[in-house]
Image: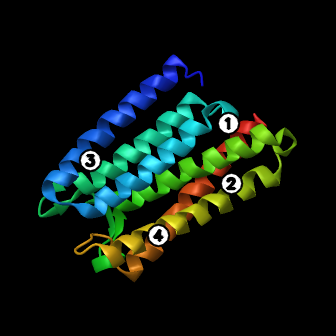
Amino acid sequence: MRIKKSEWAVCWFTLAYVGAFGAWFLSIGNYEFIWYIATMVGLILLVGINLRKAEFPVALLWALTLWGLAHMAGGGVKVGDSVLYSAMVIPFSVNGELSILKYDQIVHAYGFGTTAWLLWHLLTRHYPDTRGTWTAAVYPAFGAMGLGAVNEIIEFIAVLGIADTNVGGYYNTALDLVFNATGAIIAVVILSLRGRR
């Protein structure tokens, strides 16, 4: 398979931070994030295997890898007594687990907005007649929300199998789903508006 120079740059950047964070998580015994790294490696392989068939734009590949980096940093960078994922960015509402706006919530919105972009790209590439239609907006948004739910299942598996995770409870899960949907909707609105121009 032919890999373009711009794609190699994304690849080496991704491998560098996954390796660095993987070593860090192993050294501190953070098995929750080792589980996430294993999941991420599977996703990286999925994108890599389909690189030529999907012809992902390099900007999309960078968006995906920056999401991965934001996720790894969220669990690996200490902020006070906790990690970056728990940090409040803008305290709109601070009420225990129902607190908004946390780093975690921004990463969820960004990540599943990027997922909606990926799904939009695949849909409009393989079915070009959908470009500019409601189908090209609705399906990627709902698909990203569905993958966001799969992400919550992966977090739930981590909670069941690994002691002392930082996943959170019901409100955290619900807020994650809300921010996943928000990011997906924003992404398809931007893609739709850009397409009309």
Mark 2 or 4: in front is: 4
The answer to which of marks 4 and 3 sits earlier in the sequence is 3
Q: CA distance from mark 2 to mark 4?
A: 18 Å
Q: CA distance from mark 1 to mark 2?
A: 15 Å
Q: Amino acid at mark 1?
A: Ala
Residue, disc 3: 22
Which residue is depicted at the point 47% across and 69% down?
152
- Image quadrant in which you'd find residue 51: top right
Asked whether 139 or 193 is in front, the reply is 139
Residue, disc 4: 152
Q: Is residue 132 left or right of residue 6?
A: right
Mark 4 or 3: in front is: 3
- Whether residue 3 is situated above or below residue 73 in the rendered picture: above
The answer to which of marks 1 and 2 sits earlier in the sequence is 1
Q: Is residue 54 left or right of residue 72?
A: right
The answer to which of marks 2 and 4 sits earlier in the sequence is 2
Q: Can see residue 86?
A: no
For residue 140, the mark is: 2
Q: Position of residue 39 (x, y in %)?
A: 43, 55
Q: Position of residue 110 (x, y in %)?
A: 48, 51
Mark 2 or 3: in front is: 3
Q: Amino acid at mark 3?
A: Gly
Q: Secondary structure at mark 4?
A: helix
Residue, disc 1: 54
Q: For the view shown, which residue lies furthest in the bottom direction?
A: 170
Q: Amino acid at mark 4?
A: Glu
Asked whether 56 or 47 is in front, the reply is 47
Q: Position of residue 106 (x, y in %)?
A: 41, 56
